[in-house]
Structure formats: structure tokens, C-alpha cells
Image (cartoon, rainbow, N blue to C red):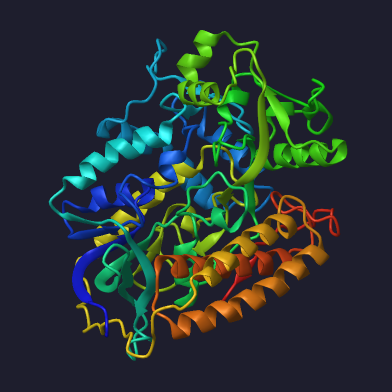
Amino acid sequence: MSRKTTSKNFDVLILGSGLAGQSLALRLAATHNVALVTKRKLEDSATAWAQGGIAAVLDTTDSIESHIDDTLVAGAGLCDEATTRNIVEHSNAAVRWLIDQGVPFTRDETELGFHLTREGGHSHRRIIHAADATGAAVQQTLTEKVRHHRNITVLEHHIGVDLITGHKLGLSRQRCWGAYVFDIEHDHVVTLGATHTVLATGGAGKAYLYTTNPDTATGDGVAMAWRAGCRVANMEFIQFHPTCLYHPQAKSFLITEAIRGEGALLRLPDGTRFMPDHDPRAELATRDVVARAIDFEMKKHGVDCVYLDITHRPAGFLREHFPNIYQRCLELGIDISKQWIPVVPAAHFTCGGVVTDISARTELPGLYAVGETACTGLHGANRLASNSLLECLVTSEAAASDIRQQKKSPALPKLPQWDESRVTNADEEVVISHNWDELRRFMWDYVGIVRTDKRLSRAAHRIRLLEREIDEFYANFRVSNDLIELRNLVLNAHLIVRSAQKRKESRGLHYSLDHPAQLTRARNTLLRP
């Protein structure tokens, strides 16, 4: 028996409910009928997990040129300079928009009125934040507005399956016309038509065994765009955050980079500082440098973790500036005003993604990508701390502006329902969970912070086997949330490994023991389906 299917049409379909998706929905809702699709609740996204803040030129002692220079240095020669300038020049206006929405950023007695902190790779204090839970404050503020806007239809517990394109419909004109979306709670596929479709689904951190990302970070947007014929770029550059709390009961708990910005030191178990031996910027070096240094020291000394020491700061200061970290560590028996914090690196951010232009447009007409799903050229080979939420804000405004300027939208063609007539219910779901575990483990072992040609070759072989199994499973059984996510994760792993194999050098976040030198000319890694 076929499961229920339904169809709905909208002006704009947004997949993803983080800062990029929600800010875009709010900017378009006055003039467009918007659908916002999210895999869990509206509040659940990587944005809500972001601790540090938003990098922006707000203080008179700072400058746009300084922020651009810091971004270019971190990006190791692969940042697109025009895109970087555009995003940094719009940083002040982007933050002011959030302030106008009511985001409760931490205040102080300065002329600006807001406290600015500093993070690794930044030459100035330019990170505006809401204590140590900036993402949660932003998410809660925007969620309240999105949930009650009459022009925004929120579809919770829905996940994108595939984009609907002109070629798939047998039309001569190639364009995106919406997406097939799986209703997780009611176990059926919905056909959502739209003249403008936006991918804001975040990154693919769950491809790795250890990650700071939420469980929803399965690279859905990148996979859907790739299957629709879009190019992806620079997928080898997976940023590993240097400091994830190391504790058996602390799943995916990040220790913000701002804690190093406020003076925390990295130490070995015997108390020795090691960062000055790796980089003159010591603890304030960029994330790729710090993550590799920690990985090196852990392997050299055979230790399970290193330690972050902020005990020289008063308890009152720590409770004020890092209340969530202070409380969470205390719950686990660690008083950070008296004890060092055990930390390890973990997969954190996907710097590559779907290729877009400065207006967030992909190569497929009618399809946009914003936030971590996209490769705008801002991050290059390594993202500068706190530039990600900034990118979400500026690119969502660019997408909104481009959509608003299109006075006459093309008429939607008749869209077919999802066809399940030739598949059955899955017989053994254990296949999915086993493949998921295997993927995350070998990606961590073979495609992690330090890579070799042999490790990448092994990973590629395992991915090919998984792809065959999953393709067979997908062809014969009805879709489920777990199957959709696994299918997308394996495709993202394929793109990461393929990109890493093409880069015969070490640059930014991609470090190869077989190719330790950096080539004279920096080139993007572009893949086409």
C-alpha cells in the first residue's frame, strides 16, 4: 500500500532553520509566501550550538582592512578577495540588524555599549557575543519571530530528499522547482513546489566520529545540490575545533575559542605549555595550527587529551563571561577557576560546499545556498573564528535582495507526486546503523587532522563499498530519516576524500604527510557531477 503524499506550493522554500535560513525567511516574509523546513524543532540547528560570537567591524579602533587581512591570512591564499571584502563591509549592518531584532548581546560601559572579545587569528577585539551562548541567543530571538509570522509556514520534523529540477521533469529548461521532503512524524513524502529554493542545511560534521556539531549536520544540502548537477568546491577543508571537552559524559560540548582570547593557556598533563613551540601567536594562532599542534602533542606523548588553563582568572569573571561553560564543567566535577579543562580536537566546520556567487545563487537557476552549505570563497582553506555567523547574515540578505528584485517569477509546472509503487518497507534497519558507525570511524581515522595518500585511498575504497550498499537499499526500500541522512553523509564523505586526493600539497586545514610543502599557486578544488 502506498503511503500518503501531499503537495504544496510556495514562493520561497528554505531548507534549514539556522541563522541563515531564519534570517532569510524573516527578510522575505513581508513580500513572499515562505516555507521553512527543519529536520527537528525550529530551535534545533548548528547556530544554536555556537558559543563564541559574530566577527564584525564595530569598534573605532578596528578597520575593515584589518578584518579582511586577518581573514585572508587564515584562509591560506584561497579566500576570494572580492567576496571577503563584500561580507566584511556588510558586517556592521548585519550585526545592527540582529540588535534591532532584539538579540541580547553582552553589554559593557564602552562607547560602543557592547563587550567585544578576541579569538584566534584576529588582530583586534571584534567578536560581539551574548556571554558564551551567542548562537542560542540569536536562535531564540529569531525563532520567536519566525514561529509567529503569518507569511512563514514552518514544517518541523521534515527532511529534504531531493530537489525537483527541470531535467527530472522532462523539461527543456533546467531550473529548480522545489523539493521532495520526507515528513518524519507521518512517514510520507511531501511535494513542495517553489519558484525559489534555498539550501541552508549546514555542514557535514556527523561524517566524523568526534564532532562539535549537532546530530542534524549530515550535509543534506550539499548532497541534494550535487545530485541536481551543481558543482562543489574545497570539500577537503574540514575545520577541526581545537578544544572540545574531553569527558565520557560530555557529548559534543565545545569550549569556545574566546576562552583563549581571554588568556587561557594550553598545557600538557605535566603542566608544560606547548603552543609557543608551534607558532609565535601561541594560543591565539588560527584553528588549523592549534588543532594540529594538539594532535601532534597527544601522539608524541601518548596522552588522551591536553588541558586548557584559565585558573588565573577570577571565578566571578569566568561566571560572567562563560556562564554555560562554567556551569557545565561544574556539573561534571570540574571547577574551571581552580582546575584545568581536558580538551581534544573535534570536527567542527565544513569550509567547502556548493559553489555560489555573491548573491548566493548556485549554477542551477532558482536554487540558492547560504551559510555552511555554500562555498562563497570567504573561508578559503581555513575559516577565521566567528566569521561563520557573519557569513550566514550577509549571504541571506544577498539572497533575499536577489529574490526581491525578480519582479516576475516563472509559473510552476505541474509537479509529480513521489513514486513508491516499486519499493517495500526495509527488512533490516541494522544495515543503516552499522554503515553509519563504520563511516564515521574510518573518516576519523583516515581523513582527519593529518592525512596520507594511503589513508585517503583506504577511505575511498570503503566509501565505494558503502555507496553500493546504500544505493541498493535506496532503490528497493521506502525512504526513512536514517536512510536519507546516511545516503547524504556517504556522498559528502566521497566528496571530501575525492577533493583531498586532488590536493597534492598541505594548505590550511588540509595537511598531508606525503605532500607537506605548500604549492606556490593557490587553487580551489572544484568538482562537477
Residue 512 lies left or right of residue 7; in this view the side is: right
**Which image quadrant: the N terminus?**
bottom left
Front in this rendered view, residue 407 or 276: 276
Horizontal and vertical percent position of residue 435: 59, 68
Number of callouts in the render?
A: 0
Compared to residue 156, the image places residue 476 above or below, namely: below
Residue at 30%, 69% (x, y): give it. 187
Front in this rendered view, residue 214 or 106: 214
Q: Residue furthest left?
A: 150
Is residue 157 in view? yes
Residue 61 lies left or right of residue 508; in this view the side is: left
Q: Quadrant of residue 528?
A: bottom right
Horizontal and vertical percent position of residue 211: 58, 47
Is residue 234 in view? no
Residue at 53%, 57% (x, y): give it. 204
Compared to residue 475, the image places residue 303 above or below, namely: above
Horizontal and vertical percent position of residue 207: 58, 58
Q: In which quarter of the image is residue 37?
A: bottom left
Residue at 26%, 72% (x, y): give it. 190
Residue 238 lies left or right of residue 105; in this view the side is: right
